Amino acid sequence: MNKKGISPLIATVLIIGFTIVLAAVVMQWGGAFVRSLTEEQAVLAEGQTNCIKLNFDMTATIDLVKITNNADVVISKVLIQKIDAAGTSSTLKEDETDISGYEAKSFDVTTGLPSGVTAPVEGDTIRVIPYVQLANGDDYGCGKEVAKEYKIPITAV
């Protein structure tokens, strides 16, 4: 029998070549993966930093919510919610009007309400959740930790 195969030297070269190609593929994928994770964390850090810098006040009546931005961070969007006496939360308005630094804006919360949502009444609590704009143009919601709440007073009859 005269069986021929590849020489051990060629087999070794092929294995080394295959290993190098496989390592290059893994490095390319790993580099892109790490880069995307780093970018995501940078965006998150930017949003959280801007939220920490944010300082705003709010007042509310049954038809109007006034938000005063007391910082140089622009509020790019506000989510205005109503919490009724039973503790049920519903969104009254989601407005993408910028509130620049040291500026105040008022929002009518009785018109343009989502279907099934009623206007606030005395005794309801109004919650404002601010959003800040990131360098990439996306809005970042600051969350309930930064949100402010205001209970609409009940007037005596």
Image: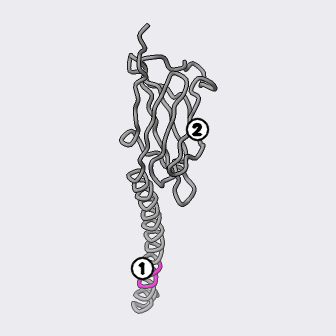
Q: Residue at x 60, y 43 (%)?
A: 97
Residue ranking furthest to the left: 145
Q: Is residue 84 above or below residue 38?
A: above
Dot 2: what SS? Answer: strand
| C-alpha separation, residue under disc 2 versus residue under disc 1 | 55 Å
Coordinates of residue 146 in the picture (x, y in percent): 38, 43
Image position of 16 (left or right of 97): left
The picture quadrant where one finds residue 83 is: top left
| Residue at position x 42%, y 67% in the image | 34
Measured from the top left, where is residue 29 in percent x and y?
47, 69
- Residue for badge 2: 95
Give the labeled residue for mark 1. 19
The residue range painted magenta reads 16-21
Q: Nearer the viewer, residue 129 or 71?
A: 71
Q: Residue at x 45, y 28 (%)?
A: 126
Q: Quadrant of residue 106?
A: top right
Of the image marks 2 and 1, the number of the one nearer the N terminus: 1
| Amino acid at the residue labelled 2 | Asp
